[in-house]
Amino acid sequence: MELQLVGEKSKNIEVADDVFSCAFNEPLIHQVVTAYLSSGRAGTKAQKNRSAVSGGGIKPWRQKGTGRARAGTIRSPLWRKGGVTFAAQPRSYDQKINKKMYRGALRSILSELIRAERLFIIESLALETHKTKDFIAKLKDLNLTDRLLVIAESVEENLYLASRNLINIDVRDVAAVDPASLVGSEKVLITVAALKQLEELLK
């Protein structure tokens, strides 16, 4: 299939149909995005249960004859300074995703972006200066002002410096592209070289 370059009406680029013309597989995309976000969780939350709280090795008073409720330890969850009943423990939130599933989800997302006219291709993103206003002016010329993901073959110094203070614009190279960033962006701007790199990775 052929895709038109943004800002250049007469120039098209040829891309592989098996990468950029796939069916929209919503269950697969949901599973892969959920797994990706879950793997980013630290899972370090921890609380002390009754076995981890110090003290309480001796029965506080005898079983019968005191008029008080029977008790075996002062570290019971019912007591002040006692352990937590269902204490949270460190855990891993990782979910297993095969490479075939991951690549299939990326192909499905990119294909849907093309069908929805949310993927824009540009010849190059080389900036002459590192000024943010120049970068914004270039994006306005392309009519790209929404929540934007910019994908370049490599993030050069001028591009990094010009975009780092922009809240709604995320600049990445091909290696840093993930399904969550693609799904969460209103529009995606990608260079021709980056598109070809992505195509080779997803074939």
Image (cartoon, rainbow, N blue to C red):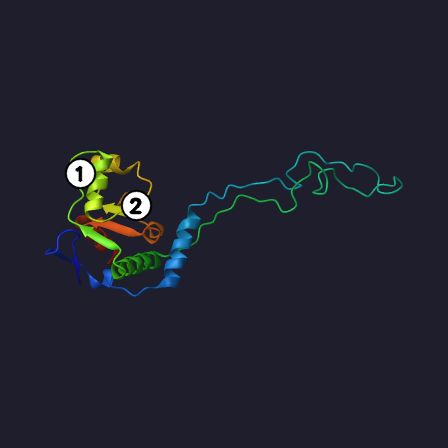
| Distance in Å between CA atoms under marks 2 and 1 | 21 Å
* Residue shown at 77% from the left, 41% from the top: 72
**Mark 2 closeness class: few <14, some 14–19, many ≥20 residues within 10 Å:** few
Tag 2 residue: 176
Determine whether the residue tagged by mark 1 lies in a helix, strand or loop: loop
Is residue 44 in view from this perspective?
Answer: yes
Pinpoint residue 179: horizontal percent, then vertical percent: 34, 53
Residue that lies at the very extreme toward the right in this rendered image = 65
Determine whether the residue tagged by mark 2 lies in a helix, strand or loop: helix
Pinpoint residue 131: horizontal percent, then vertical percent: 22, 33
**Mark 1 closeness class: few <14, some 14–19, many ≥20 residues within 10 Å:** some
- Quadrant of the rendered structure where residue 171 is? top left
Pinpoint residue 6: horizontal percent, then vertical percent: 17, 52
Check residue 107 in the rendering and tell me which mark sits there, or answer none.
Answer: none
Check residue 127 in the rendering and tell me which mark sits there, or answer none.
Answer: 1
Give yes or no for contact between labels 2 and 1 (Cβ–Cβ under 8 Å): no
| Three-letter code, disc 2 | Ala
Residue that lies at the very extreme toward the bottom in this rendered image = 23
Q: Nearer the viewer, residue 40 or 132?
A: 132
> Which image quarter holds the N terminus?
bottom left
> Which image quarter holds the C terminus?
bottom left
| Three-letter code, disc 1 | Leu
In this picture, is 6 found above or below 55? below
Q: Nearer the viewer, residue 186 or 62?
A: 186
In this picture, is 24 found above or below 7? below
In this picture, is 48 found above or below 198? above
* Residue shown at 22% from the left, 38% from the top: 159
Pinpoint residue 85: horizontal percent, then vertical percent: 66, 45
Is residue 153 in view from this perspective?
Answer: no
Q: Is residue 126 left or right of residue 178?
A: left
